[in-house]
Image: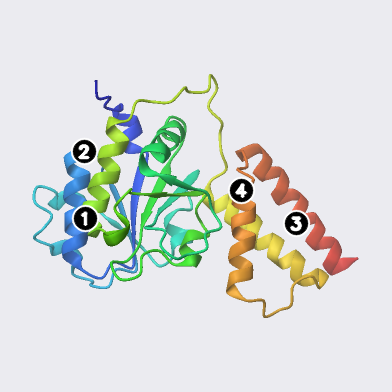
Amino acid sequence: MAFVPASDLLDRLCVVLVATRNPLNIGAAARAMSNFGFTHLRVVNPYDVAFREARSAVGAADLLASAEEFKSVAEAVADCALVVGTTAATARELQQPLHRLEHGAPLIRQQLASGRVALLFGSEKRGLSNHDLSHCQFLVRIPTRDEHGSMNLGQSVAVCLYELIRTEVAAMPSEPIDRATSGEVERITGLLLDALRASGYLKPGASAPTEEKLRCLVRRMDLSARDAELWLGMMRQILWKLHNG
């Protein structure tokens, strides 16, 4: 029997569309969200500023009107404890674990029991960039055939959300872990980069791929909120010593 999650689980998922080029696709994504009961849509640098008028958002005009706009992925996911990216995973060297959608959905559902989750979708032309992916703890892919792996953005959102509401909940921990938010993890990453530059380990003009690898490294630690607070304190003390010692 299909399992439909409780309303509080639906309320904790944020669908994040990054650099979407066609406003009709944003409307189609909003319609799919409304179909399955998800209400939090976030957009990062949409290509067309008139996306809120997309006629493809049939029955979801209010959801589209309330979509939140952000200038960067970091800002869009700052309050989320888990960030998951979507990718076709063709000819790319990935730094994050990659799961088929049906295997990743229970992991997302498990985190939704205790905190907010961001599900990222990239632009129609290029998908999510390596920089975008560096904010993710893991990635999911829809198992399409190799000869035609790319799906329409609105369809991808619909398939992913359907899988989330139909998947039986995996065995839940008796005490859900209070995970650090993406914003807290990003602050730790920033302090670590500052410390590595101050110590001479990284040159001032370190390349973006190096920073992305470090961001992925920190996210793989899967820090709890309490541990994140400890790491922030340690990194601030290290930086103070480097600058004043």
Q: CA distance from mark 1 to mark 4?
A: 29 Å
Disc number at residue 236? 3
Q: CA distance from mark 2 to mark 1?
A: 13 Å
Q: CA distance from mark 3 to mark 1?
A: 43 Å
Is the residue under label 1 in contact with that under label 3 (CB below 8 Å)? no
Q: Circle 4 sits in a helix, a strand or a loop, which is it?
A: helix
Above-or-below relation of 199 to 219: below
Is the residue under label 4 in contact with that under label 3 (CB below 8 Å)? no
Does residue 216 appear left or right of residue 23 in this picture? right
Disc number at residue 220? 4
Dot 2 or dot 3, earlier in sequence: 2
For disc 1, the marked residue is 154
Above-or-below relation of 162 to 66: above
Horizontal and vertical percent for residue 116? 43, 41
Horizontal and vertical percent for residue 8? 34, 30
* Comparing labels 3 and 1, the label whose residue is closer to the camera: 1
Q: How is the image coloured?
A: rainbow
Above-or-below relation of 157 to 72: above
For disc 2, the marked residue is 36
Dot 2 or dot 1, earlier in sequence: 2
Q: CA distance from mark 2 to mark 3?
A: 43 Å
Q: Which of the image's four quarters has the C terminus?
A: bottom right
> Given the image, on which type of amino acid does mark 1 rest?
Gly
Dot 1 or dot 4, earlier in sequence: 1
> Given the image, on which type of amino acid does mark 4 rest?
Arg
Q: Residue 80: tell me if it is visible.
A: no
Horizontal and vertical percent for residue 170? 43, 25
- Residue for point 41% across, 62% down: 90
- Residue for point 11% across, 58% down: 56
Q: Residue furthest front?
A: 147
